[in-house]
Image (tube, coloured by chain):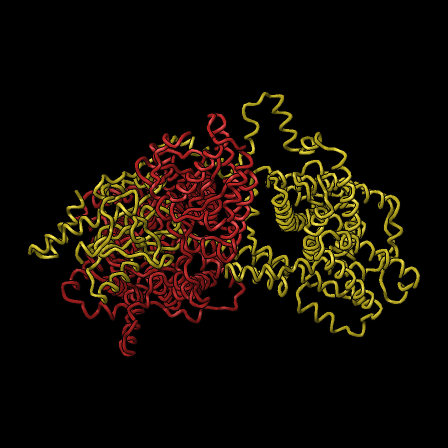
Chain colours: A yellow, B red
Amino acid sequence: MGTGEYDYPKSSFEQQPHKVAIPPPQPFIKSLKTTVKETFFPDDPLRQFKNQPPSRKFVLGVQYFFPIFDWGSRYNLSFFKSDVIAGITIASLAIPQGISYAKLANLPPILGLYSSFIPPLVYAMMGSSKDLAVGTVAVASLLIGSMLGAVVNANEDPKLYLQLAFMATFFAGVLQASLGIFRLGFIVDFLSHATIVGFMGGAATVVCLQQLKGILGLEHFTHATDLVSVLRSVFTQTHEWRWESAVLGICFLFYLLVARFVSTKRPKLFWISAMAPLTSVILGSVLVYLTHAEKHGVQVIGELKKGLNPITIMDLSFGSQYLSTAIKTGIVTGVIALAEGIAVGRSFAMFKNYNIDGNKEMIAFGMMNIAGSCTSCYLTTGPFSRSAVNFNAGCKTAVSNIVMAIAVMITLLFLTPLFHYTPLVVLSSIIISAMLGLINYEEAIHLWNLDKFDFVVCMSAYFGVVFGSVEIGLVIAVALSLLRVLLFVARPKTFALGHIPDSSIYRSIDQYQNVKTVPGILILQIDAPIYFANAGYLRERISRWVNEEEDRLKSAGEDSLQYVILALSAVGNIDTSGITMMGEVKKVMERRGLKLVLANPGGEVIKKMNKAKLIEVIGQEWIYLTVGEAVGACNFMLHTYKNVEKSGSSGSSLGKETQSDSNV
Amino acid sequence: MGTGEYDYPKSSFEQQPHKVAIPPPQPFIKSLKTTVKETFFPDDPLRQFKNQPPSRKFVLGVQYFFPIFDWGSRYNLSFFKSDVIAGITIASLAIPQGISYAKLANLPPILGLYSSFIPPLVYAMMGSSKDLAVGTVAVASLLIGSMLGAVVNANEDPKLYLQLAFMATFFAGVLQASLGIFRLGFIVDFLSHATIVGFMGGAATVVCLQQLKGILGLEHFTHATDLVSVLRSVFTQTHEWRWESAVLGICFLFYLLVARFVSTKRPKLFWISAMAPLTSVILGSVLVYLTHAEKHGVQVIGELKKGLNPITIMDLSFGSQYLSTAIKTGIVTGVIALAEGIAVGRSFAMFKNYNIDGNKEMIAFGMMNIAGSCTSCYLTTGPFSRSAVNFNAGCKTAVSNIVMAIAVMITLLFLTPLFHYTPLVVLSSIIISAMLGLINYEEAIHLWNLDKFDFVVCMSAYFGVVFGSVEIGLVIAVALSLLRVLLFVARPKTFALGHIPDSSIYRSIDQYQNVKTVPGILILQIDAPIYFANAGYLRERISRWVNEEEDRLKSAGEDSLQYVILALSAVGNIDTSGITMMGEVKKVMERRGLKLVLANPGGEVIKKMNKAKLIEVIGQEWIYLTVGEAVGACNFMLHTYKNVEKSGSSGSSLGKETQSDSNV
């Protein structure tokens, strides 16, 4: 191919090409400090403390851990009005939900109320979200029930079971607070969005299935949570089904779903949906009281103890033989609760345009659960449903949590007898209606459209939970998420570049249809950092690119390949294995009579290449700042070579000459 | 700052900016096929089968699995001469080493000879390396000894112990072959180079420490492998030390080390080092025979059974209660052996300029161990020391392995009685001298210079093995390697770009000292794919960049920030969490009154942004092909805005106007 046929703009090589700079060496301590800062303090939380007098630093420190002292001073009456309305609304939701979820965890129903009293007060002081409403959640409750239930039977030894639940809550709190204190919040990031969607959907399905017990008024029920066991349990005792219970349950479920539908269509009417659980409870209780349905197969809550949370700090026994169970349950439920709470807090903060600090939130969650475990509460977090109601009710600050706590306190002190006749089937309906909202099939469809692998992860987590168990689903989900990260690293993309006509811009041939490849030169972009996990793959893959290109050129009858340019713009980092790999690639290319050229190596890459003396091996003059300049240099050599060839010498000896030339 | 002060070349914006192309959508099946191919067949092993008639395909298939049929037809006499010399040389090393390593695994010494007979024959047919010499290795032997020894005492129940060793070998073989068949060879890549250096060094140290038993002629010795236990065991029984044994051991060790030193200095004299173990064995045996030292505290091998490998296929019992131990041992030792064998094969192939296929090698290793487990052999691989001798002895093909096997066969049939008087202390010296070569302190120093984290990983593996146990060291090393991968993904680099004077090239401010930042515009490069594991971090980090830039501008009294350009050249991929993050960043920037501009999104990124309708959110006109064009557009807007401001309007309303402009 002659010079005229190829429209590459030569100017960029004719002018002096730019040099690739090697960043100045940094002292080890400094680079270590930078790395630690980037790893653990990416958001630079100490920024505001800089250049402040000590007294101011102390105030800022207190405000950092107790944001209430920060926003408290700006609090005013109009905020308070909004917060009172929001607080009462979420209390009306918290009371029936709390009782329902405690049943799900096989814990006494009153614990659900206790857990809506102390933890919200702690969060109001320490939390930085304005919209989060604290309370227990269904999935964590179910997990506590199934993990502790595998070791201790809640009916046979209720005291031990209760003790383990408090200990699990304590360890969950310790874990959460430690993650926050040691700035390890990013661990939660490894639960990908797709994982959480699938896991939550699966858990919601399982929770709904468990409610068949309440709806059908069954006395005996399987302890397993998988679909097959539950359906077998339901359909082997069809003679035990109670139509009274079922009718009541379906009516209330219908009422709750209609209320939710109305609120979804008209956000202004949020209170219809928010109040529906409480009205269901009141209606149901009145109905049972009047008809004495409790004597006709409709089970009721029964007596709830009056009075505030008993202190349980003395119940935490660290010498217990079940310590490992408590720790395991605490870790699993703590992480799940954290993931939900942080995600909820973050999304509302995004909506209202303020920032929350993930690590700080973790400390708040942790302290709230440690305090909870000492005062008869079990695991709490920021549930989505309750926070959404709080948000819609117009809450302004965490004071709405305080208002909710006071409302629950009043209930605990005076109103518990009113729940005596509340039918369990109403609680089941409340749970089902809340859970149906968690099965986010729209998001699953969105994942399918956007990213098939994310969809597979999501579905695996879902089916793992539904057909296996909650733990199996969680393990599958985490393993798949990790596998995905590892695959990301192990199989980076590589693609060939061509130049965009009338420019010196080089872009992927796959993405840009109009780019032109450069004769005799293969330009490859490596699209990821080069590490031990992908070094072997990249070496093989580069060889294959060269093979394929040579085959293509041969079948098209074009000139053979002379240069391979590696565009390293996207190679952000390289480790020792990567450096070794580059040396090997250089050797392989040399063996095949090809010249290896590098374009735009980044700071880390060129620094390590320099340290490993790889720059000398490849040749300083074969490293360019841009792909354009590298192509220019190669073309210049190619044409020189061509012209000499035309004047009669043999090709092979010249190939060597060019090669030895390049080693100058 | 006026127009004149700023030297940005405007031409690139005045001419029509290039459009970012969205790659054409691919059918799901096709993209799935590509992904599977890239993940499992990156080296395209089926390439040679394309467009061939069926008969040729069959021949190629046989040659693929049995490379001997490929190179066998080109074999000639001069190759044979070289291979015979190399084969006899490695046999002279294999016999004493085999006996020594079998002792290390607490197995009968004869197994070391059996294992140098059948597996080399299998490898010669199936392996693709020309230089690998097959045999047992010290580290895997030690691991088998310690893992099986934890369950069964080799002295109390030798039959069961032997059976478990064969079963472990069988499972190691099955694992290796399956990894190869299912193209999962990349799993071995996750053992990083640094990990292997540290682990091997630690294991070599531990093996040397174990030899104190033989050198000092101790009868009782600890079963633990850690430094503390071994030293305590040695120094609590000083009265049992045998000076005869120690003197003999130190003399032979000195002889072996001198021989190795000579060979290292003069590679031509490789045979001095290669023959040294055998001459030590002969010398030692003669010495003991003449002096009857076996009656004065020098332990000898004793009787070795004459005859070829007994068949042990019937001994593999899959109903055994120790099945799980055998499987666990098989997996751990199989992976370790594979990592060493593949690495050794690869390095010699690189040296002699030929290619070996990792997955095919795994199948060969696997078949060799499965066959071995049926014929009284325990785990074999390609040890570095033996392969290096093979290479130095001038081997041409795997025929040298066949020659070695024949030499070992002759030994087994006729010469075993000669080893009756071989003193154990000589075997200990042979092991120590081989192990000292594995403690690669030079490589550790190299790692320290090149990459500090790699050094930490290496040292952790080393100290884990030396002070804990081989298993602990391995777990630490693998965990650290995985942690490193996860940290790589979780904490990508971001850096600010500036433009190189007299060009439209934008590069990192850290790397290039002479680049100039652009007033009013912050250009950030994200240096990794955006995934769920780093989306949260990047969101925080981008905010911090903006904060820091605004602080800097404020303190310098310069114009405030108006545009944030994200250079996405290095973002090779993005998942759903990443897309959500981009949307959030857009929102955050808008809230702060900044305009978000994207430069050079890759194919995957723009495709997913398109699917998620993020392009409309950010605005088609705010996505540019190059950073240069993006800066050009921003500058154009900035100057328009400036000029209007100068003509008297208020800044804030204009800011809004600019913003609404951009939504057109």
What residue occupies the far front of the structure in this picture?
B647
Which residue is at the front of the view, A106 or A69? A69
Instruction: In the rendered view, tell whether residue B564 sits above or below residue A567.
Output: above
Quarter where residue A212 is shown = bottom right
Q: Is residue B33 visible?
A: yes
Q: Is residue A430 left or right of residue B495?
A: right
Query: Closest to the observer: A574 or A643?
Result: A643
Residue B221 seen in the current view: no
Instruction: Give the side of residue B51 with respect to residue A387, left or right.
Output: left
The answer to which of B570 and A35 lies nearer the viewer is B570
What x and y, as percent, mark residue A9?
24, 48
Q: Is residue B466 left or right of residue A254?
A: left
On the rendered image, what quadrant is the C terminus of chain A found in?
top left
Q: Quadrant of the N terminus of chain A?
A: bottom left
The spot of residue B630 in percent (x, y) is 41, 44
Question: Looking at the image, which residue is at 81% across and 50% down?
Answer: A110
Q: Residue B231 falls in which quadrant of the image?
A: top left
* Residue A309 x, y percent position in the rendering: 81, 43
Q: Position of residue B522 (x, y in %)?
A: 45, 37
- So how many labels did they put on this image? 0
Q: Nearer the viewer, residue B263 or A556?
A: A556
